[in-house]
């Protein structure tokens, strides 16, 4: 994996010249056509131009779920750059140039890859970088956040349309919709609802949790749980007293992150957690962050896996597509 460093201002300084060059070339073609120099070749131009455009397609994917969907659609050869949240599939960050963190993109770094377009998840930035990319003439498609099954299906369709593969994207979206419907049936058969506290980080004596209107809140609901942090909105710090009052049955955290790598013994020895129902069974669940919170094609399976962890006694079946 090669992480792009901020290069010189050449990409920014040169894009106007490139645009001018394209305009001159286009004017020359029109002139030749008018003079009859290309008489009879209009049909061949109409065939060749799309083929050349297809071959020249160079996509920068900013957002883990954008990369995941493009790969699921078989469009990885079009991708020339990805951001550091593009953890799935694992080869993405190994094979493609990294353009940095999705919220801290470098316009110069992106432009150095000569992209034909950028497909970015909502929240990508910073705004100044996006403004420079737009000024360069690089098309940018922003993909809205998805916190519901319907929104996930729409997200897949939007990414596919931007990449020029609308029909395959519709097929993938339909398959994902079917898995969400299977998940609904599994959820209806659960014995009850456990209270789940999603902990994003444990740093400097502060516990950052996922409240209402977050991906954590949405995945807990899909898995048949109740968000124990519903008293707050967004990802916010929660006091020890508030955590005890929230009385979670289970604590949910992301796997493989140095920001929150406490084990069950360490976690439930903390005053905030030692008095909770979860402490009695040391009920701590860890899952991969993008799988759990990405809200892309794998989300029905992630919710099913979380459900199986929350309710082992229910013997939750695999989704049909995952068997």
Image (cartoon, helix red, strand yellow):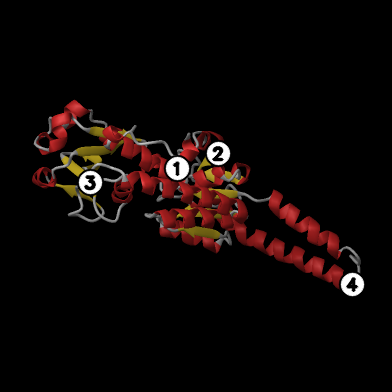
In this view, the mark in front (2 or 1): 1
Task: Tell me the tag on residue 35.
Answer: 4
Please, what secondary structure does the residue beneath circle 2 have?
Answer: loop
Which is nearer the eye, 38 or 182? 182
Q: Which residue is mark 3?
A: 209
Q: Earlier in the sequence, mark 4 or mark 1?
A: 4
Of the residues under marks 2 and 1, which one precedes in the sequence? 2
Q: Are marks 4 and 2 in contact (CB under 8 Å)?
A: no
Residue 135: name its quadrant: bottom right
The residue positioned 33% from the left and 38% from the top of the image is 306
Residue bearing the label numbered 1: 298
Gap in angstroms between the C-alphas marked 3 and 2:
33 Å
Query: Mark 3 and mark 1: span between their CA atoms?
Result: 23 Å
Nearer to me, 255 or 119:
255
Q: CA distance from mark 4 to mark 2?
A: 45 Å
Say whether residue 53 is left or right of residue 260: right
Residue drawn at the location 23% of the way across and 33% of the way down: 284
Mark-to-mark CA distance, 2 and 1: 22 Å
User: In the image, which is nearer the foreground, mark 4 or mark 1?
Assistant: 1
Q: Residues within 10 Å of mark 1 (few under 14, many from 20)?
A: some
Marks 4 and 3 in Cβ contact (< 8 Å): no
Q: In the rendered structure, which disc, 4 or 3, sits on the residue that comes first in sequence?
A: 4
Residue where numbered disc 2 is placed: 96
Query: Is label 3 in a helix, a strand or a loop?
Result: strand
């Amino acid at each position: 994996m090669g992480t792009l460093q901020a290069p010189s201002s050449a990409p920014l300084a040169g894009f106007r010249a490139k645009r001018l060059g394209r305009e001159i070339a286009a004017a020359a073609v029109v002139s030749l056509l008018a003079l009859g120099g290309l008489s009879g070749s209009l049909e061949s131009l109409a065939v060749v131009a799309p083929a050349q455009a297809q071959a020249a397609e160079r996509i920068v994917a900013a957002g883990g779920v954008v990369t995941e969907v493009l790969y699921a659609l078989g469009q990885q050869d079009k991708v020339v750059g990805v951001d550091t949240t593009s953890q799935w599939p694992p080869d993405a960050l190994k094979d493609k140039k990294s353009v940095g963190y999705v919220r801290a993109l470098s316009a110069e770094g992106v432009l150095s890859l000569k992209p034909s377009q950028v497909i970015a998840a909502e929240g990508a930035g910073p705004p100044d970088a996006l403004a420079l990319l737009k000024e360069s003439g690089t098309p940018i498609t922003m993909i809205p956040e998805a916190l519901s099954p319907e929104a996930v299906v729409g997200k897949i369709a939007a990414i596919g349309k931007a990449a020029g593969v609308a029909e395959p994207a519709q097929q993938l979206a339909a398959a994902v919709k079917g898995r969400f419907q299977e998940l609904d049936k599994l959820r209806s058969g659960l014995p009850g609802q456990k209270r789940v506290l999603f902990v994003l980080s444990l740093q400097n004596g502060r516990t950052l949790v996922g409240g209402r209107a977050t991906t954590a809140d949405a995945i807990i609901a899909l898995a048949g749980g109740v968000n124990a942090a519903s008293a707050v909105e967004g990802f916010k710090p929660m006091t020890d007293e508030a955590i005890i009052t929230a009385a979670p049955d289970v604590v949910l955290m992301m796997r493989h992150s140095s920001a929150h790598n406490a084990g069950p013994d360490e976690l439930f020895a903390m005053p905030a957690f030692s008095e909770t129902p979860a402490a009695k069974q040391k009920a701590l669940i860890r899952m991969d962050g993008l799988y759990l919170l990405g809200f892309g094609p794998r989300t029905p399976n992630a919710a099913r896996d979380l459900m199986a962890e929350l309710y082992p006694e229910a013997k939750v079946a695999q989704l049909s597509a995952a068997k």
